[in-house]
Structures are given as structure tokens and as C-alpha cells.
């Protein structure tokens, strides 16, 4: 893996972390401000948060493996 490819992976991990944080913030806002009336929003926001976090975890593991490979 080249240094440029590693930079692309790192940038992707940071982007996915930001997205997962944004979903987590929406989930937090739902809990803090909209429940119990907004209970119907829980499944969609929770699933989107889970999916975003899972995408980050996959990308982060790929980055860690690439970094370990480079370090030898």
C-alpha cells in the first residue's frame, strides 16, 4: 500500500467518524428533547447511527491493518 493510499484511507476514516458522530448527536437529541412523543423516530435514527458506526469500524480496521502492514 502506498503512502497516498494510506492517506486516502485515513481521510475516509475521519469522514466516517464525523458522520457517525452526527448520527449519534441526532440520537442524543431525540432522547433529550423529543421523547416520549417522538418514540416512532427511534428505529430509523438508531439504525442509521448503527450503520454509520459500523461503516466507521470497518474502515478503521482496514486503516489499522494497512498501517501495521507498512510498519512491517
Image (cartoon, rainbow, N blue to C red):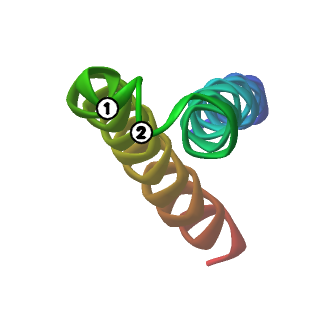
33 vs 26, nearest the viewer: 33
User: Residue 20: where, in percent of width, then height?
Assistant: 58, 35
Q: Quadrant of the C terminus?
A: bottom right
The residue identified by callout 2 is 36
68 vs 52, nearest the viewer: 52
Q: Residues within 10 Å of mark 1 (few under 14, many from 20)?
A: few
Labels in figure, total? 2
Q: Residue at x 56, y 28 (%)?
A: 34
Q: Residue at x 49, y 37 (%)?
A: 35
Q: Quadrant of the N terminus?
A: top right
Q: Residues within 10 Å of mark 2 (few under 14, many from 20)?
A: few
65 vs 27, nearest the viewer: 27
User: Residue 41: where, in percent of width, then height?
Assistant: 32, 21
Is residue 13 shown above or below 41? below
CA distance for labels 2 and 1: 5 Å
Q: Residue at x 69, y 26 (%)?
A: 22
User: Residue 33: where, in percent of width, then height?
Assistant: 68, 33
Please indicate whether residue 4 sits to the left or right of residue 43 in the image. right
Furthest toward the front, the residue is 37
Is residue 46 shown above or below 54? above
The residue identified by callout 1 is 39
Q: Secondary structure at mark 1?
A: helix
Furthest toward the bottom, the residue is 72
User: Residue 9: where, in percent of width, then height?
Assistant: 62, 32
Q: Residue at x 56, y 32 (%)?
A: 30
Please indicate whether residue 30 sits to the left or right of residue 46 in the image. right
Please indicate whether residue 64 sits to the left or right of residue 46 in the image. right
Splitting the image into 4 quarters, where does residue 69 fall?
Answer: bottom right
Q: Secondary structure at mark 2?
A: loop
Labelled pair 2, 1 in contact (Cβ < 8 Å): yes
Amino acid at each position: 500500500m502506498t503512502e497516498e493510499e494510506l492517506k486516502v484511507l485515513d481521510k475516509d476514516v475521519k469522514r466516517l467518524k464525523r458522520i457517525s458522530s452526527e448520527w449519534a448527536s441526532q440520537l442524543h437529541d431525540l432522547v433529550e428533547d423529543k421523547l416520549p412523543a417522538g418514540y416512532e423516530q427511534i428505529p430509523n435514527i438508531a439504525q442509521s447511527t448503527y450503520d454509520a458506526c459500523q461503516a466507521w469500524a470497518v474502515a478503521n480496521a482496514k486503516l489499522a491493518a494497512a498501517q501495521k502492514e507498512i510498519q512491517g
